[in-house]
Amino acid sequence: MTKEEFHQLCRSHALTPVSDIRAVGWERGYFVAVQYAGKNRVSVSLPTGKDDEKTYLKALNRDLRDRLGKAAGFSWANGVLTFFLNTKKLPDVYGQGVLGVLDVLRGLGFAVPDACPLCGGTGCDCAVPRGAAYVPAHRACLEGSVRGAQAKAEKNAGSYVLGALGALLGAVVGILPSLFTIIALHKIYVLLFMLIPLASCAGYRLCKGKMNYAALVLAIVFSLLGVYLLNFTVQLYYAAEEYGLSIRDVLPKVPSLLGDPEVWAEISGSGDFLKCLVFAALGIVLTWGQISRTNRTDVKDAQGVLASAVPYGRPQAPDAAYDPAAGGTAGDPTSSQE
């Protein structure tokens, strides 16, 4: 199946396009997302309830195999059930494949959630993406979510002081696994240094720091400081061990050592420090999506969800022009094709 053939398939069955490769609509009483998944594959996705996998998995495996054999498979993850249809093995992709898997679900008495994820109420008038599927929601709830995120961003309540303290404490917590492995096992597990920036950012959030770009800057600064503190602690430990000093002997010297520029210069020039620094920086890169989130990011996310909403119904005109670049119109969600 080509992409053009997929578009024709969706048009002929009155599905509403949401992208160049995906369309949604009502079929067999289910609001499904049908996607072009490659030259020989089409997928059908729908949301599921919390305990549905335990209830239906075994029977679904059996009945789907009996109905379509090796022409269909499925995955069930994160509350989304997705069927994969082999278009080479299904002469009638829609009639045999799409309707086939939905008939299997109907035979099992499978029902999809109909409650809004924001308020828990029913009577939803739109649907929004969750993974490959679309879940019902209230447009008013989505608009309220945008307004709430905007109000929070404008108010931006929080404290830089508490946030900085939290970022520092988080960085300290982030270095503990590395400190343990270095002292107890005499090994450096470089992947553990990636925890430092994530823990620092988490500390900033837990201590109610203002969620703007200061959170990002402080997470990076205290991550670097955490690497310094780790190397300082390790060197202090080895020095005390070498000279046979106890913790009681060492602790009084810590403030003066921390204030000695030569100590910091020596740490900065060591190969271990540079190695730690590189992997802490790599941790910043890998966790960028978390440490760079601000209240404005939350606003953009809420606006994105609202913009992705589609009417919770199927198109009234089956032969309407299918434009993959534009969303369609929808009718009464109760007019399911049976």
Image: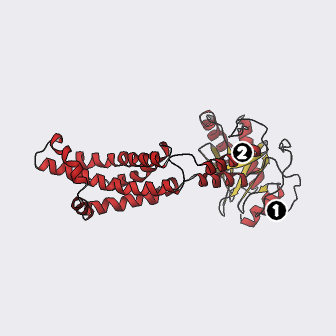
For the point 46% across and 50% down, the residue is 201
Q: Quadrant of the N terminus?
A: bottom right
User: Disc 1 marks which amino acid?
Assistant: Tyr
For the point 43% across and 49% down, the residue is 164
Viewer-side label of 2, 1: 2
Instruction: Answer few, some or many: residues within 10 Å of disc 2's Cα (few below 14, many 20 plus, some between 14 and 19).
Output: some
Q: Is mark 2 on a helix, strand or loop?
A: helix
For the point 19% across and 48% down, the residue is 253
Whole-angstrom CA distance, mark 2 to mark 1, is 32 Å
Q: In this view, does 103 lie above or below 279?
A: above
Question: Would you identify the image quadrant in which residue 136 lies?
Answer: top right
**Residue 248 drawn at (x, y percent):** 17, 40
Name the one closer to the observer, 96 or 36. Answer: 36
**Residue 47 drawn at (x, y percent):** 67, 43
User: Disc 2 marks which amino acid?
Assistant: Gly
Labels 2 and 1 touching (C-beta < 8 A): no
Q: Is mark 1 on a helix, strand or loop?
A: loop
Name the one closer to the observer, 225 or 21. Answer: 225
**Residue 189 drawn at (x, y percent):** 31, 53
Tally of numbered discs: 2
For the point 23% across and 57% down, the residue is 260
Mark yes or no: residue 83 visible: no
Instruction: Answer few, some or many: residues within 10 Å of disc 1's Cα (few below 14, many 20 plus, some between 14 and 19).
Output: many
Please name the residue that numbered disc 1 is placed on.
322
Please name the residue that numbered disc 2 is placed on.
144
**Residue 192 drawn at (x, y percent):** 36, 51
Question: Would you identify the image quadrant in which residue 264 lies?
Answer: bottom left
